[in-house]
Amino acid sequence: MSSSKVLKWVTGGLEAILGIPILGATIVLSFLWIPLFVMLILHIITLVITNKEGGSTTGSILGIVTSCIAWIPFVGMIMHILTAIFLMIDASKPDSKENQFV
């Protein structure tokens, strides 16, 4: 499994946790919005590695946008859920022939 796939699964799982209505809001507010900054950094790292490996960058770009606007209460929750879905769909797709190790 490529490193970009692992990062997509990790960031997708974290986005899914942040998308849970009361739990995600509690995490973000109790840590003073630092989780949004951490997710922004993780999405940027995932984007760079995915781009280097030639994979789909849609989920990571959506994650960057989500991290920037997730401080808006209901918009943030919806964006976290959508980002988690996109990242996990990207992560579940098989690697292209060039990126597979034999």
Image (spheres, helix red, strand yellow):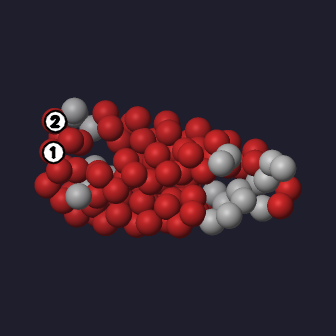
Q: Nearer the viewer, residue 95 or 69?
A: 95
Residue at numbered disc 1: 26
User: How many marks on residues?
Assistant: 2
Q: In this view, does 32 lie to the left or right of 62?
A: left
Amino acid type indicated by mark 2 = Ser
* Disc 2 residue crowd, few under 14, some 14–19, many 20+, Cα 10 Å: few
Disc 1 to disc 2: CB gap under 8 Å: yes
Residue 71 drawn above or below residue 33: below
Q: In this view, does 69 lie to the left or right of 7?
A: left
SS type, badge 2: helix
Residue 83 in which image quadrant = bottom left
Residue 23 in sight here: yes
Residue at numbered disc 2: 30
Q: Which residue is drawn at 23% across and 42% down?
A: 28
Whole-percent x, y for residue 2 in the image: 67, 46
Q: Which residue is drawn at 76% across and 45% down?
A: 52
